[in-house]
Every structure is written in structure tokens, then in C-alpha cells.
Image: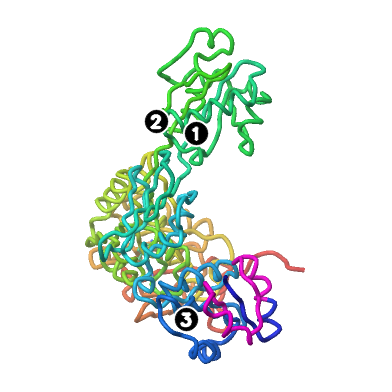
Amino acid sequence: MIALFAVTDAGRRTAAELAPALGGQVRALDELPTLWPDLDGAVFLLATGATVRLVAPLLADKRTDPGVVCVDEARRFAVALCGGHEGGANTLATRVAAALGAEPVITTASDAAGSTGLGELVDLLGATVDGDAAAAGTALLDGTARVENPLGFPLPPLPTRTGEPRHTITISDRAAPGAAPGWTLLIPQTLVVGIGSARGATAAAVAETLRRVETEHGYDLRAVRAVASVDLKADEEGILAAIAPFSLTTFPATVLAQVPVPNPSDVVRAEVGTPSVAEAAALHCAGPGAELVVEKIKGDNVTVAVARVRPKGRLALVGLGPGAADLRVPRADAELRRASIVVGLDQYVDQVRHLLRPGTEVRASGLGEEEQRAADAVALAAKGHAVALIGSGDAGIYAMASPALEGAGADIDVVGVPGVTAALAASSLLGAPLGHDHVLISLSDLHTPWEVIERRVAAAAAADLVTCFYNPRSRDRHWQLGAALDAFRAHRPPTTPVGAVRQAGRAGQRVWTAALSDFDPAEVDMLTTVVVGSSTTRMVAGRMVTPRGYRWS
Ligand code: SAH
């Protein structure tokens, strides 16, 4: 039994809310000594100090003591206080945290290193667990689990094996004889069932044919993610009843007729307008790359076929922001921990190395190898890995996302995580220069001829847009910024504010402004973003402000 103990009103409310989520009971504190020997877990809605004093006299042996978790009054933290592994406190703290939206605080060695837990694996696979999840979870964190991933899901790094495997975790859609001690199955949602039938096929016949997917072909029906057919069958009662709670996804016969299948039928073509329903619907619904794992099975007036969705590799394009850790979005951290391979410029990798899970492969390379880096990241994802390609600011702004996606196919999943780009980091330091229409222009002629850049600069100047210059000036490109500012001088008052930020959000940050007539490009380098105001931009109390330009009342 899991018992929950509270003394304050807030604590009692939290305990009452938690008890059903944990399958536990709220008990009185004075019952603790009597309950202790039989407890599987104890959750205290108390400070750690108070909890330590209460349980200290009762603690005997880590192999027999229950896991002890305490939760602060504000419900911010669920602390696994003792019995982390063997008492299950780490798992319990994680469950409590999940139920309350709190942070689990876990301090035992392998967990503190931030290893991937079973719950996380289950969630990312959308899997059904068959077997002793608690034992599997403990073995995984202890480094005594062997994880079998024959379908090649792009998993995050798994805890390093520290000893002889005591538990096997198999990720599979193959029907197994059932979980055995020391063996847990994670059944992912990989299968799409296609069904065809004559009008009036019975639910019993459909169900019986479906069962043969498991009994004769060895696929676990718990791995089914969707059931598909032809439009004509959308209201076929026998099918709908047999597949509940799934709904039926249907496609026009003309679409299914285009799908190459191993067992087409002229009879079906004549009746329905496609030579295959079950096989074609399964394959079409499962999407590109799907494999027909069970060819058409014929039942009583019904046919069933099964396609397997191919797990795709995963590419996360992650912007780290300008540099300060607290300007990096939380989702970036999550994606870095989700990846088994992190690709990036060495200085950016160094910024986040401490966040990576043990076992993460790091591919750091130097400046000037952008295209190769992007191509490598895509190729690794195409091989089925979980890859994060990182860069500063936003990954999509003068950065790696474009070359990566130019070379990426539909065979990988892509996830973008926005980052705070230099223009935003700079503008928040300067004031509110982007309060009205604005434009970003890179002055680098590495990938763009200067004539094109010049035309765009002139257009921005003429259009009275606030303009942020990226890559404004380097040793070898020293005159372009001056030329760009001259273009603006032709269109804007000499008093127009120009702001500059060097190393925004990093050590050595410098912020300065000057009038357009006085701004000195020599102070600018490649680590600087320059913001030229529009004709309405003003300095107010030392801050650069571009009015919104319409009335508020
Ligand atoms: N992807 C990046 C931009 C890369 S281009 C982003 O979204 O921010 C590189 C240019 O960005 C630099 O030459 C500079 O103009 C600007 N930049 C990047 N980081 C900066 C920072 N921390 N402070 C000021 N400017 C920065």
C-alpha cells in the first residue's frame, strides 16, 4: 500500500487529490509506525526535515524499507527522500510529480545523471506495457536492463549497462507468449489493419479474422494504431462493431486502386472499383515506407491485411538563443535530451554539453563546415537516429535549418524548436526598436552577391523599415556596413537612432546607440547586431523606441 500523510490544510488537500492517482490511502500520522512494515511507499506532504525526523526511527534496511517521498507545501517538488531504487521512491516521486505538475527531485546516481526512464520510453513510443513495469523501470535505471529495439525506433540514449542484464525490455509488435519474469514488452503503435468485406459481413466474422492476425501471423493486436477500408464500407456495421473503440478510416476506391498490392482481385475491382481493399487500405493508411506484414487473410465474407508503419528517424532543429542559459527555451533542453546524437559547432555544443544525457554522441565541428554539418545531421536521421542539430539564436535564421531541410526527405520526422534570435535579444536590450514594421538583412556576401544585398538594403531604406543587420562587418568585409548606412542616410533624418549590441546575452555584452549621422561602423564586428531605426524611431530616456503608429484610445 502507498500511504499519504499530511498535517496542514493545504497538505491534506494535496494528499486527497494524489491518493486516487497513486492508488494510495490518506492516513493519520500516528498510524505511521504500525503501517510502516507493510508500506510499499509513503508520501509526506511535509518538509524534508520533518519527514526525516518521522521516518528515521523506522528505517531498517534499504531492501525492505518503503520508498519515501516528500512534497513541499507549494507542490513544486516531489523529493525521493530514501529508498530511491529498491524502495521505489524514484519511481514514486516521478509519479507524484506527474500527477501534480511538480518537479521530481531524484538524487541517486544513475537517475541524477538524467537517464531515460521507462515511463519516458513508453510515452514517446505511445506503447502498451506488458509485464512488470516497475521491475523494468528499476532495471533500466540501474543499468541492468537490455533493451531490444528491432524495429529501430529513434530512442534517446539509454542508461549505460553496468552489469549482467537482469531484465529484457523488448520493443516489438510481435505477439509474444506473454511477459515472463525478467522480461517486459513495450508494444508500440506500428500496425494498420485494412479490412474489406461483403455487405452484411458479421461482427463475429470480422473479429475472428482479426484474431488470426495474432494467432496465425504472430502480430500483437495491441500494436494497432488505425483501421482502414474503402469509403463504401464507412457504415459497414459488422466492421464498426468488431473494431470498436477504433473508428474506421476510409479512402476513395480511386485512391486505393493506385496502391500496388501483392494480391489484387478482378472480382473486387469489378464490384468496388479497386482491385484491393484490405491490402491497399492498410498500406495507404500506413503511409510511405510502410511494409505489408500480413497479406490478405480471407475470413467469412471479410478480408484483413496488416501494414507496418516504418519508424522514422528524427531531426530536431534546435536554436539555443543568443547565449545566456535562461534565454534558451525549455523545449530546446527537452530536445537535446531526446536526441542520441547532437550535431553542432563546437562552441555551441560546449554551451549545452552538461544538459546531454550520458551516452549522447556528440559531433562537434568547426566554423565553415555548415553545409557538411547539415548534411551529416540529415543523413544520421535518415539512418533512423534521433538527432539534434543545434545553432545559436534561432536555427532557422541565417543558420542550419535551411540547408538541412533543403537536403531532407519525407523519410525523417523534423521538429523545430525556436530560439531567441539576435534581433530579439538585441532589441530587448535597446528598448523597443521593433515596435513597427521591420526587416532582417544579412550583410554577409558569402552566400549572396553584394548587388542583391545592396538592392535589398536600398529597398528597406526607401520603405522606411526598421532594419536589423546580421553579419554586419568582419575583417575582410569592412566597408559594407558603411555603404548600407549611407543608403539609409539618403532616406532618414540624421537624428535617426541606430542601436548596436555586441555579444547579447554573453559575457562581454555591450549595448550602444548613436544618431545615424554619427554611427561609427568601425566599432562593429561579426558578434554585433545593428538596428537602424525608421523615421519614427526616437530615443526616450536613453531607450530606442519605434512607436506602434496608431492611436490607442
Ligand atoms: N541564427 C543566429 C544568427 C546567425 S548569423 C540567430 O538567430 O541569432 C550570425 C550573426 O548573428 C552575427 O554576425 C551577429 O550579427 C548576430 N548575432 C548572433 N548572436 C549574437 C549575439 N549574441 N549578440 C549580437 N549579435 C549576435
The magenta-colored residue range is 14-43
Q: In whole angstroms, how far apart are the C-alphas of marks 1 and 3?
A: 44 Å
Report the amino acid beneath label 3.
Leu
What residue sits right under mark 1 in the picture?
192
Where on the image, by quarter, is ligand 1? bottom left
Q: Residues within 10 Å of mark 3 (few under 14, many from 20)?
A: many
- Residue 291: numbered disc: 2
Q: Residue at x 41, y 41 (%)?
A: 176
- Residue 81: numbered disc: 3
- Residue 427: numbered disc: none
How many marks can you see?
3
Report the amino acid beneath label 2.
Glu
Report the amino acid beneath label 1.
Val
- Residue lying farthest right? 553
Give the dominant element type of the magenta stretch: helix, strand or loop: helix
Q: In whole angstroms, how far apart are the C-alphas of marks 1 and 2?
A: 10 Å
Name the element at disc 2. Answer: strand
Do labels 1 and 3 touch, CB within 8 Å?
Answer: no
* Front disc: 2 or 3: 3
Quadrant, the N terminus: bottom right
